[in-house]
Image: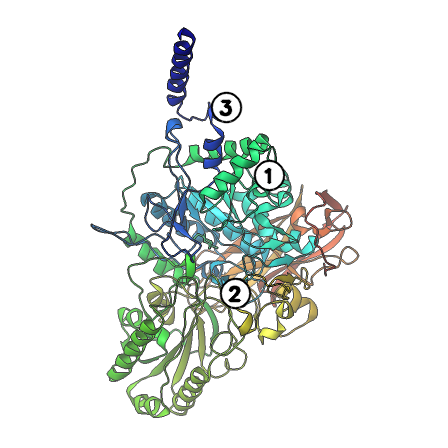
Amino acid sequence: MKKTLLFAAAMTASLVSVAQTRLTKDNIDQVIASMTLEEKATLLVGGSQPLPDSSIPTATSAKVPGAAGNTRAIPRFGIPVTVLSDGPAGVRIQPTRQGDSNTYYCTAFPVGTSMASSWDLDLMERVTVAMGQEVLEYGVDVLLAPGMNIHRSPLCGRNFEYFSEDPLLSGKMAAAYTKGIQSNGVGVSIKHFMANNQETNRNEDDAQISQRALREIYLKNFEIAVKEAQPWTVMSSYNKMNGKYTQQNRELLTTVLRDEWGFNGIVMTDWGNKAGTIIAVEAGNDLMCPGSPSEIQRIMDAVKNGTLSMEYVDTNVRRMLEYVLKTPAYANYKYSNKPDLKAHAALVREAGAECIVLLKNDGVLPLKGDENIALYGLGSYDFIAGGTGSGDVNKEYIRNIEDGLKGNGFKVNANIADLYTKYNSYAKALQAATGNGGSWFSRALVSEMEVPESVVARELPNSDIAVITIRRNSGEGADRTSAQGDFNLTAVERNLLECACDSYHAAGKKVVVVLNVGGVVETASWKNLPDAVVLAWQPGMEGGASVADVLCGKVNPSGKLPMSFPVSFFDTPSAVNFPYKVENNNNRRGPAVPRKNVDYTEYQEGIYVGYRYYETEGVEVSYPFGYGLSYTTFSYTKPVVKATADGFVATVTVTNTGKVAGKEAVQLYVSAPAGGLDKPATELKGFAKTKLLAPGESQVVTIAVDNYTLASFNEANSAWEAAAGTYKVNFAASVKDVRASAEYKLKAAKNWKVNNVLKPEVALAK
Ligand code: BGC
């Protein structure tokens, strides 16, 4: 009896002392030692509420409605729920709450592709500093962003969320994004790590990629982001890569990510419960998201039956605790739910305009500002701010082009009122038919209203110029198609374009095309028709104003393409190994007979992605990588390359030689000496954007490149190798427009040995 009492007293004492053990940075070991197996397993599994519709594999946080998920609390250690919300073009939460008259709208910033077109890392950081304020002030701890998969094919349905076909541009953009968000004391989750380059069967597709293409293209951007910005978290992808789910691949998540690159945050899964929880724990995937009780049970069972060592569990728990300690939730931050939406809208307008790429201008732009514009195309009235799926931000409004033009003093459809009415009722009918833009996962339907030739002819005398918007949308869960209405124009769009150009040109008037798209579309067959082509992308909720600012010259366009625009989809190097056919574009799970490009995808093009292929093979493109016009011109003079201890510093003087102020994105391409590995003809190794240069003004642009960045991956030696010899250093306005050159001599070859891991299961091009 006495013994029992003593035991009970001891138990109470230990519970009291444990209960008083609030997690701090100094007692992590003690907390781990005190945690029960159930508590540990609980911390490794997200704790979100499943949505009522169980066919939707997502979840939402109870603390911040509409957030994608949360981690679980363990109150006796003061471990709070931490909230995870999408990304990447802004915070994605529910804008209204039951029984609450307040609203919780977020700012829809320009999409990733759009931001990358700025080639402006400072702008990216300014935008994400603002976005991060919304993360913090809405009670979120981690933004599930940036999306940074490589644009392997123009048809990946989520390319709009991602940055580029080039790993350096992608990695630098992701690093700037991470720095901006994390400067608010909240975290990011760079995603989707990795090889999630298609949406078709994204849960099961097995991307077979050579070690060289992995290292140089598909891992490189993540490597840059991790090393330069230390993101708090990384999101593993749904798909398999070289035979294994990425979330269950220890070589990927531990050997490469942590041991080689020095990542010290947590890895979370993308939003799905896969059977191999234990392998994921062992691989170093710390957090299962959105998290289901079955995963907690699996971890507990495996530890109990000896198939999972507690060491793996403790390693991941430690990282989770270190993560929790960084969060505003742990600090009990009193968020206001009142971020500065007004200031952010102004920033969106500015950033959206900075990202616009002027593809063609036969002198019609900038407009004078007082023209009477006939505005065609549904996108002029029902503008697309960003793509669909988890990347869709719940914003309060979208400024369309009509509003933007009027706000800039233009007369729009001044005597053409019924055009406006027709487009608006067409847009409403379309929205009703597609359930307000399509279901959560589906690609939003975008069809175009037919405008009879007689209407164009009738309105011609009433207008000075025609502006035609062509729009496209896509999103999570489905790839785009090579068909009309997606990559290619529809007959309705082409007819409108031809008919407007014929009539306006016959009357000595001009036609401007605005592309309101999330990714690449075919341009080669029609770009000769209009007088100007303005690639607006999906530039966020103030998009119409950004477009108008560029059309009237308030902003001089300085965006440049972060990917190549091929003549035809079938010119793209991955075309034969991509599920472009309409009938394949679904989210089906693998059947008994594996289907090429649905159940497995061979990256046979190796490192020859985008311009690396077009430039090396001499394949014509419609618009090259890095291309973009300005209302002014720039000269590049005095190219200098100076060797440093571990590479070189390149400088060039850029002078505004035109009549209006403007900015120039200077690109530095390097061609390697012959004799080493087989290399692309040229590769982007650095870039910098000038400040706004007044006419006649110059700026010396400085770009540093280290030898490691020059290296290619030699599979035979498992090493990065930079061959000795003379490297040609080209300062360029696009990959095809070299303006000045210099040389860099590497006296002795260099190499960096890494682990021989991540081997493909089939023979592939390197
Ligand atoms: C998407 C992720 C997203 C997550 C949470 C997944 O389906 O692939 O990008 O962050 O859902 O919404």
Taking the image as shown, residue 74 lies to the left or right of residue 461, namely: right
| Residue 113 visible to an observer of this rendering | yes
Query: Which residue position holds label 2?
Result: 561
Q: Earlier in the sequence, mark 1 or mark 3?
A: 3
Q: Position of residue 123 (x, y in %)?
A: 43, 53
| Residue 554 visible to an observer of this rendering | no
Taking the image as shown, residue 484 lies to the left or right of residue 746, namely: left
Residue at the image point whose x is 28% and y is 45% from the top: 337
For the C terminus, the image quarter is bottom right
Q: Is residue 535 above or below residue 348?
A: below
Q: Position of residue 200 (x, y in %)?
A: 54, 64
Q: Is residue 529 above or below residue 472?
A: below
Query: Which residue position holds label 1?
Result: 282
Q: Looking at the picture, which amino acid does disc 2 mark?
A: Leu
Taking depth in this image into account, of 391 and 98 the one nearest to the observer is: 98
Which residue extends farthest right?
675
Residue at the image point whose x is 30% and y is 73% from the top: 402
Q: Which mark is residue 33?
A: 3
How crowded pointer 2 is (Cα within 10 Å; few <14, some 14-19, many 20+) is rated as many
Q: Which mark is residue 667?
A: none
Q: Position of residue 688 (x, y in %)?
A: 53, 55
Taking depth in this image into account, of 582 and 179 the one nearest to the observer is: 582
Q: How many marks?
A: 3
For the N terminus, the image quarter is top left
Q: Secondary structure at mark 2?
A: loop
- The residues tagged by marks 1 and 3 sit, at their Cα atoms, a distance apart of 20 Å
Tell me whether circle 2 and circle 1 mark residues in contact (CB < 8 Å).
Answer: no
Q: Closer to the observer: label 2 or label 1?
A: 1
Q: Looking at the picture, which amino acid does disc 1 mark?
A: Glu
Taking the image as shown, residue 263 lies to the left or right of residue 697, namely: right
